[in-house]
Structure formats: structure tokens, C-alpha cells
């Protein structure tokens, strides 16, 4: 079948007369059970084929969650079809194209990842869930005579395994596999191993960056929290009572506030995180550079621009910190995004046997279970956690 050229949907301005936005919509079946349909987002008209199929799933006693997932995938597919000006009944070519375009369409930014702004994409697993749902829909459509047998047959590839019986080659097991499928690539590890963490630290170009990376690897701070630190938040003394703080040993305070570099600490509840002597030393080395390089230093921020002529002494920005991470990591291996240091810290604590609630508290998560709401880690628990992991080799300064 000849295909007319179709515009790429993300840039194409859909004509409202032909494009409809379909959504998954919860309905109460007349037998009383909750089910799902696909309806027009504005008129609430039922999508005939999708809704008939969902009704069939309801009749087959599929779970409400399954039906909802199918409804959402079908709604996305039929919404995409409008601007693409394709006919769903053409089968595999249309579904393949949908899956390919879904694969390259970035997901909306998640609230969780304010610090890390690289576009995110659906995983191979998610894409296969779409492909599987649509394949099932087409199988139903074939049984309902909405598409031809030939179109339906395209959705499966049949393989016959031959085997010898004595000296005769005989057909054996017949297997069917879905024609539209996506290779599920194993995701890159989200944390650094000891060696990766060590080489990232060693690849930093100056004392400020080395302190930043070491601090994040050790404390699991989010990049926004680290950049938002003020010098008054650093209690790097054995005893901080002179500055009005009873927490023993060197530590930092993470507080939520609006900062000049647009860094916002995400935690609503302030927390304190112990730090090691090694990190204190890196901070003092950074301060030496800061005193050397700034004639006038009026910034309350811990991380400021020191190594470029522009914006000297101003708060270090997110975008520059992220570039620094990319630059440092690609010198020695795969690109590291700042959030990986947080996963690295959490992984190292868990591997060192730090109890779950203490890890949660260090990370500034609300307790994993409500039981732990009144159960707070002591200063010593948190310090034990920080010191339970082996120091990361710091490289030469
Ligand atoms: Zn303190």
C-alpha cells in the first residue's frame, strides 16, 4: 500500500477537524464493576474499536489495572494516529511506526529530577508493553473481522525448530514471537563503583570541583542541595556548640530555601549529615584557592565561580556544575550525571550494612514506613553510616 508522507507528530500542528485527543476513562459497567473505556477528551464520545476491545477484556475477567493500562496505551495510539493520518487497520507498519516514534519522544520532566535535566525516554520494557497491548488488540480485531487474517498474521513470526530423529530431520517445536518488539537494552548502572567514583574524583580539574564531587559522593546530597549550601551550613568542627549547634563532630546542615544560583534544596525538613575529616580537608584546600582568587568575597554561598574570569565570586550555577560532571567523567569513562553520586552514596551505605531507616534519613527521604516516623537515627548512627564505607581514593591535588 502506498503511504503518503506523514509529518513528524511532535512538530505537526494537528488539524482539530481530523485530530482527536483520546483518553482512558473510567466507567462503571452495568453489572456494577469498574472498567475502562477510551473516550474523546472533549466530547466524551466512545472510541468504538478501542472501547469494544476493553469491554471484551472486562468480560474476560481481566483485572481493572490491566484494563486501565490497555486503555491508556490504546488512547495514546489512537491520539497519535490522527495527526499521522494513518489508518490503524493497516496493522504492523502503523504499529511499528508508533512504537518507533514513542521511543524517540522524551517523557515530560519528572518532579523528582529537578537537578538532572537530560531528557528521559521510555525504556525498552515500556515500549514492549505498548507493542504487546496493541498486538493483543489487533488479534481481537481479527477475531471480530475488523481486520483481515493477512493483516493479523503480520503480528506474529512463526519459527519451527527442526531436530534430528535418528538420521531424519523432523520439524519440532513451533514458536511464535511478536513481530513488533523492541530490544530491551540493559540500562547503564545508576551508580559508580569504587573505581568509577575514584576516577571521577581524580579527574576534577580544581579544588572546588574536587570538594563538590567528594562531598556529594560521601553525603549523597542532591546537586541542588550542594549548590545551595551556605558557609553557615558547614559545621566542620569537632564541637559546634560555639556556633549554637549541639551536633557532635563535623557535619553539614541541609535546609530548604531559595538560593541565588536557583538551587533549591528539595527537602522540606532540614537534615544534618556528618562528614569525614577527608572531606573537611578538601574544603579547606578549596577555601585557600577562594581566598587567593577573590579580592573581595561577599558571597554567603559555599560554591562560587573561581576559575573563570566571568562572574567571579558569584554562586556556581546548576548548568556549570552539570557540565563539570560531564567533563570530569568523560575524561575517564562513561558520562556521569550528578544524580549518580547520590545513588552511589546510598549503594555504598547499604552494602556496608547501614540500616534502611538510617539511609533514608541521610538521604532526606521521609521514613520508608510510618513506623519509623518517631524513630530517628542518632548523630552517632549517622556518623557510623558515613564512616562505614571505605574512603574513596582522592587522587593528587
Ligand atoms: Zn550543626
Image (spheres, helix red, strand yellow):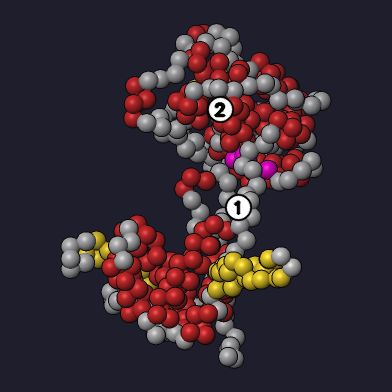
Number of other residues with Cα within 10 Å of mark 1, as a class: few under 14, some 14 to 19, many 20 or more: few
Q: In which quarter of the image is the N terminus?
A: bottom right
Q: In which quarter of the image is residue 8?
A: bottom right
Most frequent secondary structure within the magenta stretch = loop
**Residue 135 visible in image:** yes
Q: Residue furthest bottom?
A: 2
| Residue range of the region highlighted in magenta in the rendering | 336-340
Residues at marks 1 and 2, CA–CA distance in whole angstroms: 27 Å
Badge 2 is on which residue?
350
Q: Is residue 255 left or right of residue 201?
A: left
Front disc: 1 or 2: 2
**Lower sequence index among marks 1 and 2:** 1
Q: Quick check: is 241 in the magenta stretch?
A: no
**Residue 87 visible in image:** no
- Tell me the residue at 74%/41% (across/down): 329
Q: Which of the pair 308/326 is nearer the observer?
A: 326
- Tell me the residue at 58%/35% (across/down): 342
Q: Which of the pair 49/286 is nearer the observer?
A: 49
Residue 369's mark? none
- Tell me the residue at 62%/68% (across/down): 172
Q: Which of the pair 307/106 is nearer the observer?
A: 106
Establish whether ligand 1 lies closer than 8 Å to the Cβ of label 1: no
Badge 1 is on which residue?
118
Classify 237 as above or below 263.
Answer: above
Q: In this view, does 199 lie to the left or right of 33?
A: right
Q: Quadrant of the C terminus?
A: top right
- Tell me the residue at 65%/47% (across/down): 188
Q: Which residue lies furthest to the front in this view?
A: 166
x and y, in percent, of residue 73 in the image: 43, 66
Amino acid at each position: 500500500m502506498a503511504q503518503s508522507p506523514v509529518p513528524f507528530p511532535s512538530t505537526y500542528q494537528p488539524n482539530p477537524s481530523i485530530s482527536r485527543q483520546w483518553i482512558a476513562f473510567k466507567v462503571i459497567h452495568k453489572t456494577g464493576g469498574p472498567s475502562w473505556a477510551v473516550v474523546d477528551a472533549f466530547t466524551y464520545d466512545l472510541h468504538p474499536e478501542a472501547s469494544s476491545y476493553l469491554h471484551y477484556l472486562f468480560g474476560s475477567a481481566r483485572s481493572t489495572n490491566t484494563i486501565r493500562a490497555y486503555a491508556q496505551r490504546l488512547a495514546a495510539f489512537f491520539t497519535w494516529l490522527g495527526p499521522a493520518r494513518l489508518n490503524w487497520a493497516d496493522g504492523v507498519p502503523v504499529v511499528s511506526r508508533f512504537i518507533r516514534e514513542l521511543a524517540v519522544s522524551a517523557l515530560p520532566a519528572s518532579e523528582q529530577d529537578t537537578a538532572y535535566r537530560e531528557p528521559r525516554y521510555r525504556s525498552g520494557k515500556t515500549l514492549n508493553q505498548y507493542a504487546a497491548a496493541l498486538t493483543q488488540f489487533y488479534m481481537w480485531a481479527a477475531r471480530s473481522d475488523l481486520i483481515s487474517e493477512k493483516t493479523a498474521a503480520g503480528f506474529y513470526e512463526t519459527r519451527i525448530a527442526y531436530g534430528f530423529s535418528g538420521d531424519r530431520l523432523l520439524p519440532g517445536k513451533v514458536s511464535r514471537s511478536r513481530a513488533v518488539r523492541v530490544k530491551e537494552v540493559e540500562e547503564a548502572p545508576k551508580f559508580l563503583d569504587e573505581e568509577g567514583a575514584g576516577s571521577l574524583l581524580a579527574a576534577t580539574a580544581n579544588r572546588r570541583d574536587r570538594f563538590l564531587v567528594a562531598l556529594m559522593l560521601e553525603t549523597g546530597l542532591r546537586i541542588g542541595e550542594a549548590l545551595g549550601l551556605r558557609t553557615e551550613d558547614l559545621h566542620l568542627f569537632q564541637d559546634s556548640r560555639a556556633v549554637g549547634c549541639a551536633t557532635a563532630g563535623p557535619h553539614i546542615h541541609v535546609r530548604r530555601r531559595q538560593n541565588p544560583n536557583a538551587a533549591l534544596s528539595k527537602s522540606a525538613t532540614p537534615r544534618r549529615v556528618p562528614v569525614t575529616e577527608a572531606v573537611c580537608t578538601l574544603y579547606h584546600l578549596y577555601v585557600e584557592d577562594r581566598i587567593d582568587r577573590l579580592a573581595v568575597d561577599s558571597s554567603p554561598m559555599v560554591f562560587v565561580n573561581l576559575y573563570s574570569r566571568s562572574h567571579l565570586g558569584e554562586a556556581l550555577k546548576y548548568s556549570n556544575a552539570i557540565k563539570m560532571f560531564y567533563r570530569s567523567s568523560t575524561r575517564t569513562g562513561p558520562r556521569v550525571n550528578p544524580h549518580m553520586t547520590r545513588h552511589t552514596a546510598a549503594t555504598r551505605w547499604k552494602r556496608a550494612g547501614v540500616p534502611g531507616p538510617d539511609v533514608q534519613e541521610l538521604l532526606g527521604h521521609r521514613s520508608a514506613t510510618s513506623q519509623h516516623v518517631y524513630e530517628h537515627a542518632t548523630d552517632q548512627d549517622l556518623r557510623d553510616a558515613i564512616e562505614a564505607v571505605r574512603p574513596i581514593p582522592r587522587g593528587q591535588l
